[in-house]
Image: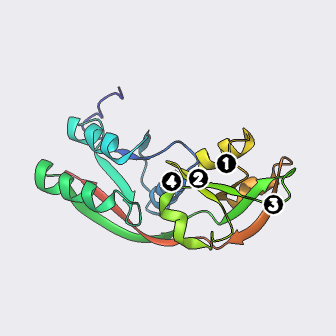
Amino acid sequence: MPNRPTEHEAVHFTLGPEGTNHDFVLRNHLRERGCRARILHAADASSMLAHCVRGDASHMMICAAHPDAAETVAIAQYAHGILLTDIFIAESYPLAILSRADIETCRTIALHPATRPYTSLSLLDEVFELTSTVAAFEGLLQGKWDSALTQRRYAENEAVKMVRPVDAARDAWLVLSRE
C-alpha cells in the first residue's frame, strides 16, 4: 500500500505500469505546469479510484477515451466527492503495429481497447485486449501474439519490425481531486 501523502505533498495516481501513455502524459502535464508530485500507478481504474478514496493520493488522472473513464469519473464525483478539477488536451506516444521480426503474415494482435479504432484490423483473425500498450509489446516479445498496436518507440528493438505507423492520439485527459 502506498504511503499516505503529507499535508503539502501532491501525489498523482494514474493507470500503469510506468511507460504507458497515461504515465507519459501525466509526467509531461506536471512538467509543463511546473508541478512536483509523486506518481503512483494502478493496474485498472477501479484500483486507482480505491486508492484515491482511501487518501493514498491527492489527484488521479485518466484519459477520456479510456473505456472506464465515464464510470470512474461518475463514481468518484457522486459517491466519493472527488471532483473533476482539470481537463486538458495532450498527445500520447506515437503508435505503430509492430510484429515479431520472424513473422511473415500477422494473424493475431494485442492492443489496449481504447486504441482499437485507430487503424483497420480487418485482416487479422484474433484481437487480444490488454490493460496497456506496454503489456501488448511485452506479450509480443514473449510470442503470445503475432503483432501489437503499441508505442512506436519499441520498433527500435531488433526482435520486432514495424508493420504500420499510427499517428499519436490527441485526447482529452481528466484530472480529479478533493482539492
- Residue hosting label 4: 27
Q: Is residue 85 left or right of residue 157?
A: left
Contact between marks 1 and 3 (CB within 8 A): the answer is: no
User: Toward which corner of the image does residue 88 lie, by quadrant?
Assistant: bottom left
Badge 4 or badge 1: first in the primary sequence: 4
Spatial CA span between label 1 and label 3: 17 Å
Contact between marks 4 and 1 (CB within 8 A): the answer is: no
- Residue hosting label 1: 137
Spatial CA span between label 4 and label 1: 21 Å
Kindly report which numbered mark, 1 or 3, lies closer to the viewer in this rendering: 3
Spatial CA span between label 4 and label 2: 17 Å
- What numbered label is drawn on residue 105? 3
Contact between marks 1 and 2 (CB within 8 A): the answer is: yes
Please name the amino acid that badge 1 sits on.
Answer: Phe
Badge 1 or badge 3: first in the primary sequence: 3
Please name the amino acid that badge 2 sits on.
Answer: Thr
- Residue hosting label 2: 133
Badge 4 or badge 2: first in the primary sequence: 4
Please name the amino acid that badge 3 sits on.
Answer: Thr
